[in-house]
């Protein structure tokens, strides 16, 4: 339970439910429980002003794993940061006190929970409303009453004749812009950027007609002040001035205004009034003041950048040239979200209308031109907007990697989330060269960060598909493929890849249609999901390859040392060591040790289940992994030992055949027959019921089968690592039993690993015929792989435990039925061909 309380809970006024980004207030008192409890304390004055508690239901929030303790811990840590920012936003900046109205608080919660960025940049919302009579009422508040400006005379007014207006100093003058004249030819939008303080440094008014003074026109309610429509944006530090009175480079813009034709409808003039420069008395002069406004056509500055353009930019940077007198606002529309492919954007000033003919030859270079242009051009601004993440503002943009906090191409994504729009605010007096390139390192790190949960779920699916191929080969009496070969076969084009990697995507879309959920962007969703599936298979192949090399290396070293040890058994120097080994063998001959050696699977199961249910599930799965690793090592050592003996005897036989006399040849033929018979008897002494397989082949198949279970359960154990680390940190603070659901799932996973530990057990896993086809373990693994795939698409990879536990419990039930039917002598429907 998430509680924000003032030293103690007093009362509940509002309960806010978060369900699929829909927030509403309920009047009744109730508590919404979630899987974590976080208490955030606030000052006592806040409690005296308002006593309330804030509750959030996590069942409807995205990316919350409720069934795993460690995921609840991680989610709570992220939520505390968001709630802290929300608390700070509850204070009214004018009064310094919390908002008393519940509706205002609810609006703050809704805004902050949907996006962690400032939401004040809402220039597209209308500032007009209509009353009950239908007449227009101007609801935009003007500047504070304590701000007084002297009315400027007509002789000090400036009449702007061009579409671009510039202010380079606080001169105390007023600029008049004719909306009808300057806004013709489709240039009906007005963009304005400035670093002057609204109301105190600059004011903007809309006039239906030109009057003599602002006070006269305001008295008749015919003038609308739009200064409050200036949106404050973050800006970088002002440039440092070397000496008082010296000219410096432009300070970055701190406010922006956008007036649409609808906003200026019914008005004839737009005025920009600039306050006079403050008097300097022993203080450094203020940074260079600036304001630039322009009537423009948004289509002139629109650039559509396709996915092909972005992908090609990974090899070579793409350039956009912006000549002088370009639109102030450049709209760059990316068809691929910058949350998926972050871009590196750099802007270089190439000109600003300054003639360099009077400069010396050594001063006429690009460096000097850039220095002079900094005195006139304001630093560019980037406004990146994403359908999911909202608005991102990047001030002083000369070279920056731009990415948005969005998760595109997910199952829960909506249409439009695959696109990102960047609006560049650049000085129209200057010319620029823009370089755009996809940042490969940022894209790779961003991809792994966004789709890590999806890749984890797909990794389990890839392993289940590999186990399916092994079980299918065993049922058909074919050699069991290794995990490396089985996982690689998942990527074969066309059919294995389409059936295993693309069909689950179509199935997820079908589920969305059944649930009447909005479909994600189909192209990007399918493409990104396929890339994640390929990446998951590659990660599993790398893990299998590394583990297989380790097993092979250790087994070869073990067999080599063991063979050398057997050669040195007659050495007198080792007599004492042999005596110690014989003495210690008496301990292993005890009854308890004999039982443990005869029933290793039972001992492993009891130890793993006990640790998993009483201590922590990770410890139980760790015992299971050790059992898998030991079995893999023993099987591989047996395989190498049998191979070395067979090769040694064949070499001995070939050497013996080199004897040139006929008697030796006759003796060799007899000895050859005897050796071949002994070799065949030894190689066919397999525990496998299939007599056609040699002992070495059987041990190799056992290694392949157990190796697959090892990889599967190793990934399952890694998912419990965060919870295990948290458990270690809680040692000494009181012990509590693991969650029941975690323990139950752990038991199912252990049963799956124990009851399917040998290839022979695959034959016992069979259901009666369904629709004319027998359901065997390979089909169950296929269903588990599809389920894991869909769980990965839904960003809930913890659900793969449900599939593994279900297989474990089903295996246990079938094993019990198998033994009962065998005791009663009843025919078994799970008979394998090799057993008959």
Image (tube, rainbow, N blue to C red):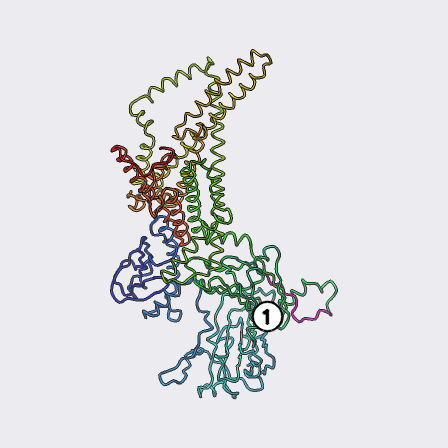
For the C terminus, which image quadrant? top left
In magenta stretch: residue 350? yes
Above or below 562: residue 61: below
The residue positioned 27% from the left and 38% from the top of the image is 817
Q: Is residue 707 left or right of residue 26?
A: right
Residues rendered magenta in the picture? 346-357
The residue carrying pointer 1 sits among few (fewer than 14), some (14 to 19) or many (20 or more) residues within 10 Å by Cα, namely many
Observer able to see residue 621: yes
Q: Is residue 135 left or right of residue 166?
A: left
| 202 or 491: nearer the viewer | 491
Residue 245 picture location, percent across and down: 61, 70
The total of numbered circles placed on residues is 1
The residue positioned 46% from the left and 19% from the top of the image is 566
Quadrant in the picture for residue 769: top left
> What SS does tag 1 mark?
loop
| 412 or 381: nearer the viewer | 412
The residue positioned 53% from the left and 67% from the top of the image is 423
Q: Which residue is mark 1?
A: 427
Residue 692 picture location, percent across and down: 43, 29
């Amino acid at each position: 339970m998430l509680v924000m309380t003032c030293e103690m809970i007093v009362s509940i006024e509002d309960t806010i439910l978060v369900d699929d980004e829909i927030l509403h207030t309920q009047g009744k008192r109730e508590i919404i429980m979630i899987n974590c409890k976080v208490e955030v304390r606030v000052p006592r004055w806040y409690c005296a002003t308002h006593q309330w508690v804030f509750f959030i239901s996590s069942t409807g929030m995205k990316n919350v794993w409720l069934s795993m303790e460690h995921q609840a811990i991680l989610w709570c840590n992220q939520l505390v940061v968001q709630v802290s920012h929300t608390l700070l936003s509850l204070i009214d900046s004018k009064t310094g006190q919390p908002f008393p109205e519940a509706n205002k608080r609810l609006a703050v919660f809704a805004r902050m929970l949907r996006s962690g960025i400032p939401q004040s940049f809402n220039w597209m919302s209308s500032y007009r409303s209509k009353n009950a009579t239908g007449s227009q009422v101007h609801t935009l508040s003007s500047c504070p009453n304590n701000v007084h400006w002297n009315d400027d005379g007509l002789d000090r007014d400036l009449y702007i004749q061009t579409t671009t207006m510039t202010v380079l100093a606080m001169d105390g003058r007023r600029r008049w812009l004719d909306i009808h004249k300057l806004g013709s030819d489709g240039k009906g939008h007005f963009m304005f950027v400035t670093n002057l303080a609204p109301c105190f440094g600059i004011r903007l008014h809309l006039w239906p007609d030109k009057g003599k003074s602002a006070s006269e026109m305001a008295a008749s309610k015919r003038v609308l002040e739009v200064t409050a429509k200036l949106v404050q944006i973050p800006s970088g530090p002002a440039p440092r001035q070397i000496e008082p009175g010296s000219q410096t480079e432009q300070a970055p813009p701190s406010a922006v205004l956008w007036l649409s034709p609808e906003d200026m409808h019914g008005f004839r003039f737009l005025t920009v009034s600039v306050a006079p420069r403050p008097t300097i008395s022993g203080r450094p002069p203020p940074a260079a003041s600036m304001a630039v406004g322009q009537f423009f056509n948004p289509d002139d500055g629109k650039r559509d950048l396709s996915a092909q353009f972005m992908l090609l930019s990974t090899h070579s940077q793409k350039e956009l040239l912006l000549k002088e007198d370009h639109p102030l606002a450049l709209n760059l529309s990316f068809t691929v979200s910058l949350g998926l492919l972050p871009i590196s954007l750099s802007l270089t000033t190439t000109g600003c209308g300054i003639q360099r003919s009077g400069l010396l030859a050594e001063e006429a270079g690009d460096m000097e031109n850039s220095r002079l242009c900094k005195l006139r051009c304001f630093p560019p601004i980037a406004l990146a907007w994403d359908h999911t993440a909202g608005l991102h503002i990047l001030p002083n943009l000369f070279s920056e990697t731009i990415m948005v906090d969005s998760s595109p191409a997910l199952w829960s994504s909506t249409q439009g989330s695959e696109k990102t729009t960047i609006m560049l605010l650049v000085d129209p007096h200057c010319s620029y060269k823009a370089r755009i390139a996809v940042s490969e390192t940022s894209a790779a790190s961003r991809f792994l960060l966004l789709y890590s949960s999806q890749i984890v779920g797909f990794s389990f699916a890839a392993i289940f598909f590999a186990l399916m191929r092994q079980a299918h080969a065993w049922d058909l009496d074919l050699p069991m493929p290794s995990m490396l070969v089985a996982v690689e076969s998942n990527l074969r084009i066309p059919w294995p890849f389409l059936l295993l990697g693309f069909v689950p995507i179509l199935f997820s879309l079908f589920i969305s249609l059944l649930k009447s959920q909005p479909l994600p962007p189909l192209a990007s969703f399918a493409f990104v999901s396929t890339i994640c599936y390929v990446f998951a298979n590659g990660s599993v192949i790398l893990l299998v390859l590394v583990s297989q090399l380790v097993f092979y290396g250790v087994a070869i070293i073990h067999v080599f040392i063991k063979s050398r040890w057997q050669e040195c058994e007659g050495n007198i120097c080792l007599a004492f060591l042999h005596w110690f080994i014989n003495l210690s063998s008496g301990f292993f001959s005890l009854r308890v040790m004999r039982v443990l050696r005869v029933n290793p699977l039972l001992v492993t199961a009891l130890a793993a289940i006990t640790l998993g249910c009483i201590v922590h599930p990770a410890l139980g799965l760790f015992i299971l992994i050790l059992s898998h690793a030991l079995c893999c090592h023993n099987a591989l050592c047996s395989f190498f030992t049998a191979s070395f003996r067979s090769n040694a005897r064949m070499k001995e036989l070939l050497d013996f055949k080199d004897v040139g006399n006929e008697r030796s040849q006759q003796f060799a033929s007899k000895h050859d027959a005897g050796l071949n018979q002994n070799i065949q008897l030894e190689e066919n002494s397999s525990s496998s019921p299939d007599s056609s397989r040699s002992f070495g082949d059987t041990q190799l198949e056992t290694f392949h089968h157990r190796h697959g279970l090892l990889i599967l359960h190793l990934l399952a154990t890694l998912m419990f690592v965060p919870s295990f680390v948290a458990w270690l940190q809680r040692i000494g603070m009181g012990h509590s039993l693991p969650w029941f659901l975690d323990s139950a799932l752990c038991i199912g996973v252990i049963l799956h690993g124990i009851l399917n530990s040998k290839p022979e057990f695959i034959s016992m896993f069979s259901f009666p015929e369904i629709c004319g086809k027998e359901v065997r373990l390979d089909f169950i693994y296929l269903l588990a792989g599809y389920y894991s795939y869909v769980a990965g698409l839904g960003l809930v990879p913890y659900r793969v435990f449900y599939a593994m536990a279900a297989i474990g419990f089903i295996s246990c039930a079938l094993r019990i039925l198998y033994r009962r039917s065998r005791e009663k002598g009843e025919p078994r429907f799970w008979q394998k061909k090799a057993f008959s």
